[in-house]
Amino acid sequence: MDSILDYFISLQESEPAELPERAIERWNKRADFWEDARKKKEKGDERVISAINYLDSKGLLEKNYNVADIGCGPGRFAAAFAKYVHKVVGLDISDKMVKHGMEHIQNEGLNNAILYTCNFQTLDIDKLGYTHAFDLVFSSMTPAIHNMDGLIKSMEMSRAWCCNITHLDRRNSLREQILQEVFGKQTAPQWNGRWFFSLFNILFLLGYNPETSYEKLHRETWVTPDEQYIDSLMEHMLPSEEYTQENANKIMQWIQSHLNKDGQIKEITDSTYGRILWDVRNKTIRPDYRTIIK
């Protein structure tokens, strides 16, 4: 290992990047489920509201600001930002996510937000005029910047601020119960904070002054299960080689035996999120800490 920075970069990039075609397939598959859950109000806006309140308290949602949302998904953050700022551009690899997001934005009567389908890794920000074009570059729970190329590109898009929000810990009591009772398995930690930990240290060692904060959210939701919901459960509980129709049938059978009189089942989720905010204009030179650690 050449330096402490190299260690944190290797930690950040320790999970192999997903092939673009596989990523598109996976996120497109999620898109319809997320949109359906949004319409049924089974997917809450607590995380969006929390981010808006945080950024607004920092003075980062000014009326004259341009904001980019990398990995914008179905546009929930982008639509919320557009109610505060001058312009919002959202980028996502999933064309279905973008389609649902634009429908949501139009339904909200917003004309200052637009979402584009693209592979952020190959995006030419100079050609598109995105270099230093945004006052805030935002990202939340996206693999698009989980490598140095993506991270540096996101910072090059900003002329002022960057903000990343990611999971530190998440527990879902329903998934844990199904995993134990149907498959005889204990739940492994879904998130371990590795990305948050590595990102903070990378930014600090690069000379930035990242500011951290944390948010805990508790959510209880009654869900009407369908095939898409079962697929989502499998994706979060089981390794990909176990995504089989047999296992889907087992999960559905268990769920059907636990439905209430209205045909619904209760999900309880407790999540901890970490936020990292930094000013790309404020950079210093850090020492090689190996030379001062005795």
Image: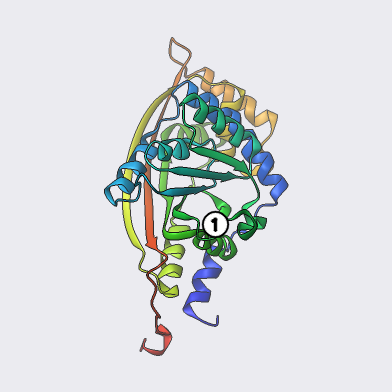
Q: Judge by depth and name the residue closer to the eye, 62 or 232.
A: 62
- The type of residue carrying mark 1 is Ile
Vertical relation: 158 (above or below) 8: above
Query: Which quadrant of the rendered structure holds the C terminus?
Result: bottom left
Q: Quick check: 97 left or right of 46?
A: right
Q: For the image shown, how many numbered marks are present on the structure?
A: 1
Q: Which residue in the protein does label 1 denote?
A: 145
Looking at the picture, how far across and down is residue 176, in whole percent? 46, 37
Residue 163 in sight from this viewpoint: yes
Q: Is residue 140 visible?
A: no
Q: Secondary structure at mark 1?
A: helix
- Left/right placement of residue 8 relative to residue 212 reads right
Residue lying at the far left of the rendered structure: 57
Q: Depth check: give the residue in front, 282 or 111.
A: 111
195 to the left or right of 28: left
Q: Nearer the viewer, residue 66 or 22?
A: 66
**Residue 223, placed above or below residue 89:** above
